[in-house]
Every structure is written in C-alpha cells, then in structure tokens.
Image: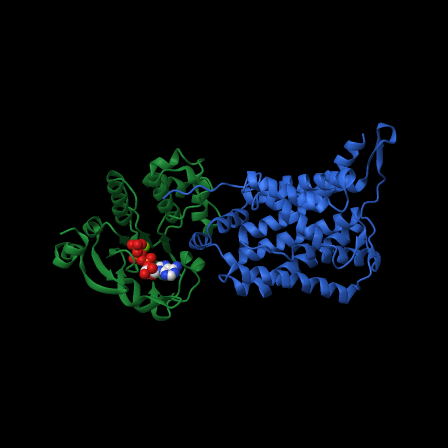
Amino acid sequence: MSTMLKIDDIHVYYGAIHAIKGVSFEVGEGEIVALIGANGAGKSTILKTVSGLMHPRSGSISFMDEQIAHMDAYKLLRHGLAHVPEGRRIFLQMTVQENLEMGAYIRKDVSKADLDMVFNYFPRLKERRKQIAGTLSGGEQQMLAMSRALMSHPKLMMLDEPSMGLAPILVDQIFDIIKQLHKDGTTILLVEQNASKALEIADRAYVLETGNITLSGTGVELARSDEVRKAYLGG
Amino acid sequence: MQILQYLINGISIGAVYAIIALGYTMVYGIAKMLNFAHGDVIMVGAYISFCVTNYLGLPAIVSILAAMIVCTVLGIIIEALAYKPLRGTSSLAVLITAIGVSYFLQNAAQLIWGSAPKNFTSIVTFKPFSLAGGELVITGEVIITIVISVLIMVGLTLFTGKTRMGKAMRAVSEDRDAAQLMGINVNQTISMTFAIGSALAAVAGVLLCSTVPTLMPTTGSMPGIRAFTAAVIGGIGSIPGAMLGGILLGVIETFSKKYISTEFSDAIVFAVLILILLVKPAGLLGKQVQEKV
Ligand SMILES: Nc1ncnc2c1ncn2[C@@H]1O[C@H](COP(=O)(O)OP(=O)(O)OP(=O)(O)O)[C@@H](O)[C@H]1O
Ligand SMILES: [Mg+2]
C-alpha cells in the first residue's frame, strides 16, 4: 500500500486560536480512514486544511507525493482531491443538474457518462435533476453534495459528517454508498460523529481530541478499545 | 399625451440607471461588496468617449468600444489594487476604500480634463420622430437606450444562466468556499465580474451623457447613487431586479420632477426606496434564501 495523503505535524490557527496542535497521520491508497472526535476537536479544520481552504502555520501535507500545504484550494481538485464539506454546502439556488455541472467544472464539459455514474449511486437525484437544490430534503442534499464531488472523479474523497442530521435508515444508505465508492476504487477520508458506524467501515481510524491525535489503530481495534467505547460509543 | 411623454422619458433615463444598477448588482452579488466607485467609472467612460469623438474625430461606435476597453481595464486594476488586498477583512474597510477610490477617480478626472463641464455630443445621429401629430416625441436616444439596456439584460441573463463562466459566477456568489472546492478560481471570477460591470458602466456613461449632455468629474456620482438605490429596490443581486428597479426609479424621478418639484425629486426617490424596503426587505425581486439544516 502506498501513501496517498501524508500529514506531518501541522499546526493550524484561527487568528490566535490554536485549533490543530501538531497532527500527523496518513491515508494509504485504497483505504477508508476515519477521523473521529468530539465537537470542536478540530476534525473539520483538518479537512479544510488538506483541501486548501485553510493553510497550516507549520508542518507539511503531501498528496500523491506533491507538497500541497500552501496550494490554493481551487487547484487541488485537479490533483484528484475532493472535499465534501460539513453542512453539504451545495449551491441552494441552482438546480440539481447545475450543481453536478459545477462538480465537473474542471473538465469544461459534462458528459452523459458522468451523470449516469452519479445517478447510478444516487438514483433519487435523477428524477430531481431540474429541482432547485434548496428545496431538496436534507438526505437528498447530502446525496447531491457527494454526487457533486464525484463528478470530478477524485482519487481521494474527504467526507465531513455525511450522516449529520439524517434518519437512521438514510445513514445506513449513505454508509453503504461510501463502501461502494471505496470498492469502486476511491480512497476515503471520513470525518464522523457517528463513531460506531465510521469504525465499522474504516480500515484505520484516528481519534482527535482538542487538536491532538490521541489514539490510532484499525477500525476494529478502536471500536473495541475502552477509551473509545467510553467516550464515543456510549459505554 | 403629456403623461405618456414623461413616462417614455422616465423609462429611458431609467434604462440608463438599470445598466448602471446591473454593474452594481453583479459586483455586489459576486464580490459581496458595494463598489461605490462604480458611478465614477461611468464618468471615466463618458470622458473617454468624448475624447475619442472630439479630439480624434472617430465615429461613435469606436468611441464606445474605446470607453468599454478603458473602463474594463480600469475596473480590473481597481479591483486588483484596492479591493483584492482587503478580501477577508471587514466589509467596512472595503466600503471606505471604495469611497476613497471614488474620490480618487473624480480628482484624477479633474486633473486630466479640468473641472469645467464639457458639452457631450450625443452618439445618436438619427432624428427624433413624433407621434400623435407632434404631441409625442420619441428621440433616437430614447430608443437606443432602451434597446441597449434590454439587450444587456438579456445578454447577462443568458451569460449567467447558460455559460460555464456565468455559472461559476453564480457559484462564487452563493458560496465562495464551496466554489473553490469545485475548482473555481475565485479571484479570477471576481476580477471578471469587475471587468463586465465596468464595461457596462462605460456604455451607461455614453448613454447618460447622450441624454444629459453635461460632462464633468462628478457626473457619475449622483446617477451612481440612484442606480445603487435602483439595485436595492429591485433586490440586490438580481438581474431582472436591477432592470425593474432602474426603470421604476427613472419613471418616479421624471414624474416627481414634472409634477412635484425638481429639488425634491431625489428625496421622493429615496422615500420610495424606504417604503419598498419596509414592505419587501429583500427588494422587489430579491431572493429570500431558505436554508436547510
Ligand atoms: N471560523 C472559526 N473561527 C474561530 N475559531 C474556529 C472557527 N472554526 C472553528 N473554530 C474553532 O476551532 C476548533 C475546531 O473546530 P472544528 O470545526 O474543526 O471542530 P470539529 O471537530 O469539526 O467539530 P464538530 O464535530 O462540531 O464539527 C473549535 O474550537 C472551534 O471553535
Ligand atoms: Mg466539524
């Protein structure tokens, strides 16, 4: 297994707030890696730093052997790194179809094959192509956010709390799709509040606490560990 | 007939406001800032056109193109030098800078062209035609202005609705970070928006001075403020809103001047603005954004 994403001792600040205090971890090609931790631990900050929306004050990030820590966010998608941000952040005033077109923005044209590919994962979106995204249900919006990211055929897909605010049945569905995406060759970095679900599908996982990684291991190991069970799995 | 005449004149000046308002609205929608210097770009456009026609003796169409090119470049430079360094800082800082840019442009114009008014020659050469036995006069300026403003509105609607660049602009306008995650270069998109807005300002400048031929360094400022009001009335960020707001404002202004008082026409216009915003805070065609959690 070769390393796809390598984060080495990054420190990230919001003004004077030291949000990420020396975090290092790796994601290997073909893995599902989960990042779990309580509210405010810094999970979203890490993803934003990897995708270039924020930059570390020190430390390095390499993706497919390229240094990306100070690269502009808009360039990273072209390297194969997609980020489905927290809260979905779809374009609410655009139609479903237009959102998907924006997902394929870097390729200048939208091929039928790409649309078929995402509708294959998310059939519900197909019949809603003309609908304004802001009128979709929360679950459909999450599906759209993931579809939009898929349109660029990413090598690594970073998902920030894809199950947030969804009914259990929909959570299962979203996790099934993540597994399917992974099977089809996409490497996944998954941030989740739903630790049990995340650890279930993760090859490896890291536990983040107030800006530091405190535990790491395979998904199974962490799911069994006392600390994780007490703190994140409800006993 | 009188009323109809005023209505037509009002629509015509309103169409100029509409073109200016379109620039305001695009820049506001995409760069999320009030470019208070927009009105002064209009003035620069008018001066360029004036110089090209009067000093170089070139035809009107060349003078308009020259004005558009100069203003486009000017818009890009203003954005890059004055606004881009402030991106991410407080909007108050940007607003004050914009006011500074506005004064800078006015003073620069005064240095270059002097403060004495120039008599702008209308770009329209064909004769006005009269209807209803001479009671109703429609000037060439009126026709040209209305036609151009409609063309611009349709063009912009198609551009933002159908083209890749236009959609990128809408994406940036809705969510800058999400747009970046789609691979959209936000800086370039904003720069492009300023270019388009400024090119429109040049057209508006030429049309404005063709209708009201006095050209001086402050020529753009009051129409700029009125057009900004128009954009707010129509719903800032909305293209048809800018058009509607502009026309409405032109008509209200013309009628108040004729029937109430020339001095108070601006006060009346702003009173209407306040009334409309009381009833519809997002403007007539403004979008009420709904968000799902
Ligand atoms: N824009 C911001 N300005 C200042 N501080 C911020 C900002 N965004 C996040 N923070 C702080 O950085 C820390 C990490 O936040 P982050 O959003 O990364 O947490 P998280 O692990 O994703 O939490 P959650 O599970 O609630 O989404 C928190 O203490 C938060 O208050
Ligand atoms: Mg978060």
- Determine the residue located farthest toward the bottom in the rendered image: A58
Residue A11, quarter of picture: bottom left
Q: Residue A71, percent across and down?
A: 42, 64
Q: Residue A47, percent across and down?
A: 34, 58
Q: Which chain is blue?
A: B
Which colour scheme appears in the figure? by chain
- The residue located at (74%, 52%) in the rendering is B64
- The residue located at (61%, 60%) in the rendering is B98
**Residue placed most toward the observer, A17 or B278:** B278
Q: Colour of chain A?
A: green
Q: Is residue A224 above or below residue B254?
A: below
**Taking the image as drawn, is residue A46 in sight?**
no
- The residue located at (37%, 48%) in the rendering is A88
Residue B103, quarter of picture: bottom right
Which quadrant would the N terminus of chain A be assigned to in this image? bottom left
Point out the quarter of the image occupied by ligand 1. bottom left
Horizontal side, residue A116 vs residue A6: left or right: right
Residue B151, quarter of picture: top right
Q: How many marks?
A: 0
**Taking the image as drawn, is residue B265 in sight?**
yes
Horizontal side, residue B19 vs residue B179: left or right: right
**Residue placed most toward the observer, A213 or B293:** B293
Q: Is residue A84 above or below residue A166?
A: below
- Determine the residue located farthest toward the top in the rendered image: B132
Q: Residue B100, percent across and down?
A: 64, 64
- The residue located at (74%, 38%) in the rendering is B255
**Residue placed most toward the observer, B20 or A56:** B20
Q: Residue A164, percent across and down?
A: 30, 46
Horizontal side, residue A22 vs residue A222: left or right: right
